[in-house]
Image (spheres, helix red, strand yellow):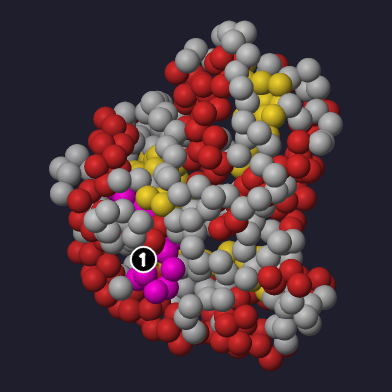
Amino acid sequence: MTPFFITTLGCKVNQHESDAIAACLEGRGWHKTLKIRDAEVVILNTCTVTGKAASHSRQQIRRLAEHNPKALLIVTGCCAQVEGNLISAMEGVDHVIPHKDKHRIPELLEKHKNGAFPVWPSSPNAEPCQETLFMDIPAPARDTGRSRAFLKIQDGCNSFCTYCIVPYARGRSRSLNPESVLEKVKTLTKAGYKEIVLTGIHVGMYGADLNPALRFEDLLHLLLEEPSCPRLRLGSLEPMELTDNLISLLAENPKIAPHLHIPLQSGADAILKAMGRPYDSSFFAERIHAIRNKLPHAAIGTDILTGFPGETETLFKKSLKLVESLPLTYLHVFPFSPRPGTPAADFPHPVPVEISKERSSLLRKTGENKRLLFAQNLVGSTIEVIFERRRDRITGWLKGLTGNYQTLLMEGPDSLLHQIIPVTVTKIREDGRLEGQIS
């Protein structure tokens, strides 16, 4: 069996695609190794969402080439798409695969292994991705040792926020047809997965490109009608897409995990406008309260950027005040990192890096306080937990995930591994994880 090594940077969509490529190769008889020096082929799936992410992608390329110079090194992903010329010229890189050909990597490698001299795709010429078709990686369902699977139902983005390179890297929004989504859900369920995470670059735009057009909630209705459908978890949704109907659907269906991630980016309207975000802070706040009223125990997370050009101390305090006032569960906070090729990279009034980091630190402290408060409110309650197929490495206890996105540890026999169990939360551990016992 030919050994290969694959590593991934960036989002859950990238991770899903890497998992699918690995599954395809293993289905063809290849062997996935965790040791780069043992690999004959090395694949890097890159990220370029920020300037810092792109720099990290290039660092990883150099590291991989240095650790195994004899391996065939293939670079794909978003950074490969928008910096194809630069990456193809880097020492050790053999092939740069654009997004539209990512699904062909297993086929190309199989031909290469068999000495068929495949025609490799041309390196992307630093041009925006023009892809308009949903290109699926037809991976077989397999036992990954995890209890939940990621399913990509949508790709690309039409929003063109001023700080974001993703629409140029991944192309326009496009959807997997609902029949295929349902079939994949059935296949993953038969393979034993207890939870399926519906992912995409802009999940809430699902179906808008189909003929006839669909809404994301139409897809959810279809999946919920399938008797074997396991627990569903939703990927990130924009505030405008969280309609009252969708919130009610989540509240009325226990098969949908009570967990929503809704990006805010800034709590200051002037900054939201400069970012090209199509809502204001009051609309965001109203949607969060609407969710909390219908789903009192749901986990609600958000993303926030600090140090966006033009963010004065007054505007930052507006963001901080808004976040403090909202019933959020956790925050993902990122200092602004200008991405060449985006309008915001050339905006005036940049914020010094140190100030941006200080603001991030303040928001992270706020986020940690909110996370702890949410966990404390769960103590004494009974919630369903999906336990993993393997025990926690540190404690040796059973480890699982609650519907509202909390990690829980519990003593118990192996017979409870990979099971859905009602558990009473008994305490919060020092490491922030929950402990529980069978109800």
Towards the viewer: 269 or 91: 91
Determine which quarter of the picture holds residue 81.
top right
Q: What's the residue at 69%, 59% (across, down)?
A: 50
Looking at the image, residue 64 sits to the left or right of residue 163; the answer is right
Looking at the image, residue 356 sits to the left or right of residue 382; the answer is right
Query: Vertical placement of 55 versus 368: above or below?
Result: above
Q: What's the residue at 66%, 88% (across, down)?
A: 315
Does residue 241 belong to the magenta stretch?
Answer: yes
Looking at the image, residue 74 sits to the left or right of residue 108; the answer is right
Does residue 92 belong to the magenta stretch?
Answer: no
Q: What's the residue at 42%, 37% (across, down)?
A: 136
Question: Number of marks in the image?
Answer: 1
Determine which quarter of the picture holds residue 415.
top left
In this view of the protein, can residue 378 be seen by the observer? no
Please, what secondary structure does the residue beneath circle 1 have? loop
Towards the viewer: 70 or 346: 346
Query: Vertical placement of 49 versus 247: above or below?
Result: above
User: How far from the left and from the top, in percent, is residue 153?
Assistant: 38, 47
Residue pointed to by mark 1: 298
Query: Vertical placement of 165 versus 75: above or below?
Result: below
In this view of the protein, can residue 252 be seen by the observer? yes
User: How far from the left and from the top, in percent, is residue 98?
Assistant: 60, 39
User: How far from the left and from the top, in percent, is residue 438?
Assistant: 30, 46
Q: Residue furthest bottom?
A: 314
Towards the viewer: 242 or 347: 347
Looking at the image, residue 233 sits to the left or right of residue 43; the answer is left
Q: Which residue type does callout 1 highlight? A: Ala
Q: Which residues are magenta?
A: 230-242
